[in-house]
């Protein structure tokens, strides 16, 4: 029997028999919290679902209130990268000029996050040549950057526009970055990129898939789970692992 419940953090979860420690209260889905989320089955033991939220706090500097914002460069100190995370589309990050790639990143100081999507707000008006065109979205595991989503030919931006993207290969990472290899200027490479806001969206907990279920799941590696990731496996049935 499954029960729809509401977590303390305001996210939806579905707790099944065998999923210990689910201290929640039954509620009726309504309003924005009833938005579509991610469904994940852990080895047939339990399903849970969350309505993803922006995982980056509203930043007031590169390190406040928590975490760390870094970037490849900046046009000048008026347009520092943390302003892409300040929740205010009247401010923006503008990259250094003629720096390819132009990247912006956020790292949590208290562990990994499971990110499922991200969103870019372009707010620079008629200067749409500064909108990102080609990029990779990458996760940092403490040692290497892994490409988890790739986008090409993002053109025809409006002067103020938000675009959201699902992550192709979600997993658990300490930091995420948007790594832009081209803007919408006709010249090759990045002339300059501007961004009003970057949202990094997902579940506020680490999803640890079970090792030994025969599925090399997001978050598992050859080192952490050789039984699942050490040799080719048939693709999982849709009932074993599903993303919504």
Image (cartoon, grey):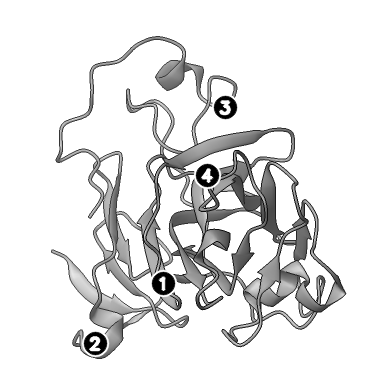
Residue beneath disc 3: 224
Label 4 or label 2, whichever comes before in sequence order: 2
Residue 167 x, y percent position in the rendering: 40, 48
Q: Quadrant of residue 22?
A: bottom left
Residue 240 x, y percent position in the rendering: 21, 38
Residue 99 left/right relative to 145: right
Instruction: Verify CB contact (< 8 Å) between mark 2 and mark 3.
Output: no
- Residue at image position (34%, 57%) is 19
Disc marking residue 135: 4
Marks 1 and 2 sit apart, C-alpha to C-alpha, by 31 Å
Q: Secondary structure at mark 2?
A: loop
Residue 75 x, y percent position in the rendering: 79, 65
| Relative height, residue 148 to residue 38 (above, below) | above
Instruction: Verify CB contact (< 8 Å) between mark 1 and mark 2.
Output: no
| Residue 62 in sight in this render | yes
Marks 1 and 3 sit apart, C-alpha to C-alpha, by 37 Å
> 172 or 187: nearer the eye?
187
Q: Secondary structure at mark 3?
A: loop
Q: Secondary structure at mark 1?
A: strand
Residue beneath disc 1: 162
């Amino acid at each position: 029997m499954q029960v729809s419940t509401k977590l303390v953090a305001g996210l939806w979860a579905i707790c099944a028999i065998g999923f210990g420690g689910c201290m929640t209260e039954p509620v009726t889905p309504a309003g924005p919290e009833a938005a579509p989320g991610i469904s994940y089955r852990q080895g047939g033991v339990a399903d849970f679902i969350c309505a993803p939220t922006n995982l980056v706090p509203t930043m007031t500097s590169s390190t406040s209130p928590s975490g760390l914002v870094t970037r490849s460069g900046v046009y000048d100190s008026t347009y520092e990268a943390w302003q892409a995370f300040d929740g205010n589309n009247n401010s923006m990050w503008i990259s250094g000029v003629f720096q390819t790639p132009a990247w912006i990143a956020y790292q949590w100081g208290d562990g990994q996050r499971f990110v499922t999507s991200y969103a870019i707000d372009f707010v620079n008006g008629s200067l749409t040549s500064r909108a990102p065109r080609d990029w990779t979205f990458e996760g940092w595991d403490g040692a290497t950057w892994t490409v988890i989503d790739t986008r090409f030919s993002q053109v025809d931006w409006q002067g103020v526009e938000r675009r959201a993207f699902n992550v192709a290969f979600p997993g658990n990472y300490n930091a995420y970055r948007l790594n832009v290899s081209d803007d919408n200027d006709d010249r090759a490479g990045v002339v300059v990129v501007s961004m009003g806001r970057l949202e990094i969206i997902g579940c506020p907990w680490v999803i640890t898939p079970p090792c030994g279920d025969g599925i090399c799941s997001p978050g598992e590696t050859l080192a952490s789970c050789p039984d699942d990731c050490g040799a080719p496996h048939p693709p999982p049935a849709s009932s074993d692992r599903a993303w919504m």
